[in-house]
């Protein structure tokens, strides 16, 4: 028995060691910030892998836990988001209930097992605006393989034999004033407590967690290579890969790869459409958003300052140029930028222009919107307070 347990632990540690090969791929940038962040990515995602495959992997005893936050990231996490989900299966019946909250956009997706680290086919989607709630903002959602009685069918998702996970995406526009959902999940058709831990069970789950770590980090680096090969232009996932997992229901993310020296800047221009929600996300090579607690590295339909004609003008640079919509490169020489349109009447593709930092003003409108240093500091203070409100710390 002791030898078996020791072998399980050794195999787990060996797989974690091998996951470090991702830092030395041919396409991985070789600067110190990117390499160091890759090391941090691996350590952060050990925690995610253990959550998904060891601690919260039993669909008979699911918990609604959040995924990404300022300390655990991957896959182009939305700076405005709170992602919450739980494991499910296709045979049991589940009840999710609580306070819906007031996020600008909320999407619920039920997924099947599939060929990505996050599952496969989306079997059902519900949007917050379509949920039936009471006058106090409470809701109840039923997931089951069979239709519910008419009295209980207002909010219902029919599961399939391959059902795997339920995910809530909450996108916040006004970080200080919108409130997150407070809800719980219960499996109505299984009442026995979880089985006691055994060395066989824990060993199997540790191997799955290590496999998920390697699979998920490799998956996203292979994805970003597609944009890295065509920098400074925005493309959607569907233009490179016809998978079923990446896009948020009801929306379209457009992504560009950027590379900037300290004496360079990039101007991104687009006129936002009429939309339920839109956002600009900014991150490094590893598909991690920058540290949005302390850096101006995103904006959205609430926070952005538009020109008088409705145009959005963003400036990406390593130092603050004083424009209203600055995205801080945060010490990284390259990474990605995403413009996400959700519930939009059309999906405009932003245009990029790379310029010398000393010549930036020549390429911007004379009436470009600007901010003072005091206004910038207030923006930063409000960002951290908004993050604390969203995540509870």
Image (tube, grey):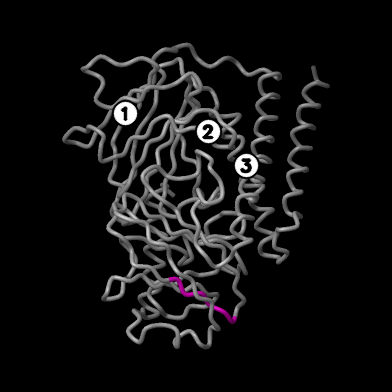
Circle 1 residue: 97
The span picked out in magenta is 263-268
Q: Earlier in the sequence, mark 2 or mark 1?
A: 1
- Residue 320: image location, x then y, percent: 48, 78
Mark 1 crowd level (few <14, some 14–19, many ≥20, 10 Å Cα): some
Residue labelled with disc 3? 216
Q: Quadrant of residue 213?
A: top right
Magenta stretch mostly in which secondary structure?
Answer: strand
Give the mark, 1 or 3, whose residue is nearer the N terminus: 1
Residue 305: where, in percent of width, then height?
A: 32, 70
Q: Secondary structure at mark 2?
A: loop
Q: Secondary structure at mark 3?
A: helix
From the top left corner, tell me how far across and down residue 373 is, in percent.
40, 79
Q: Are marks 2 and 1 in contact (CB under 8 Å)?
A: no
Q: What quarter of the picture does the N terminus occupy?
A: top right
Q: Is residue 254 left or right of residue 222?
A: left
Mark 3 vs mark 2: in front: 2
Q: Residue furthest left?
A: 135
Residue drawn at (44%, 12%) of the image: 191
Q: Is residue 359 above or below residue 97?
A: below
Residue 120: which numbered mark, if any? 2
Cβ–Cβ below 8 Å for labels 1 and 3? no
Is residue 1 toward the left or the right of residue 31 in the image? right
């Amino acid at each position: 028995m002791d030898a078996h347990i020791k072998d399980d632990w050794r195999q787990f540690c060996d797989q974690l060691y091998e996951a470090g090969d991702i830092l030395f791929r041919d396409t991985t940038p070789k600067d110190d910030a990117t390499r160091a962040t890759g090391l941090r990515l691996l350590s952060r995602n050990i925690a995610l892998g253990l959550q998904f495959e060891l601690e919260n992997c039993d669909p008979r005893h699911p918990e609604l836990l959040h995924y990404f936050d300022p300390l655990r990231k991957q896959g182009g996490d939305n700076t405005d988001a709170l992602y919450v989900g739980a494991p499910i299966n296709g045979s049991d019946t589940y009840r999710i209930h609580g306070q819906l909250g007031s996020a600008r956009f909320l999407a619920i997706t039920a997924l099947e097992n599939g060929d990505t680290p996050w599952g496969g086919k989306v079997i059902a989607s519900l949007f917050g605006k379509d949920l039936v709630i009471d006058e106090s903002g409470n809701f109840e959602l039923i997931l089951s393989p069979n239709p519910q009685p008419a009295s209980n069918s207002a909010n219902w998702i029919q599961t399939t034999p391959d059902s795997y996970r339920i995910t809530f995406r909450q996108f916040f526009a006004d970080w200080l004033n919108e409130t997150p959902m407070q809800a719980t999940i219960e499996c109505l058709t299984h009442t026995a407590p979880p089985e006691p831990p055994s060395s066989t069970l824990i060993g199997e789950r540790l191997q799955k967690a290590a496999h998920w770590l390697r699979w998920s980090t490799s998956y996203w680096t292979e994805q970003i290579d597609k944009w890295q090969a065509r920098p400074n232009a925005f493309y959607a996932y569907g233009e490179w890969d016809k998978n079923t997992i990446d896009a948020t229901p009801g929306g379209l993310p457009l992504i560009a790869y950027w590379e900037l020296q300290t004496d360079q800047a990039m101007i991104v221009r687009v006129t936002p459409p009429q939309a339920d929600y839109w956002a600009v996300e900014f991150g490094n090579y590893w598909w991690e958003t920058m540290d949005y607690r302390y850096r101006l590295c995103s904006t959205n339909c609430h926070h952005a300052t538009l020109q008088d004609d409705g145009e959005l003008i963003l400036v990406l640079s390593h130092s603050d140029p004083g424009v209203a919509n600055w995205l801080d490169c945060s010490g990284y020489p390259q990474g990605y930028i995403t413009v996400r349109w959700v519930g939009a009447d059309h999906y405009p593709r932003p245009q990029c222009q790379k310029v010398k930092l000393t010549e930036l003003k020549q390429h911007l409108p004379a009436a470009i919107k600007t901010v003072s240093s005091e206004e910038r500091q207030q923006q930063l203070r409000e960002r951290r307070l908004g993050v604390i409100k969203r995540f509870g710390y």
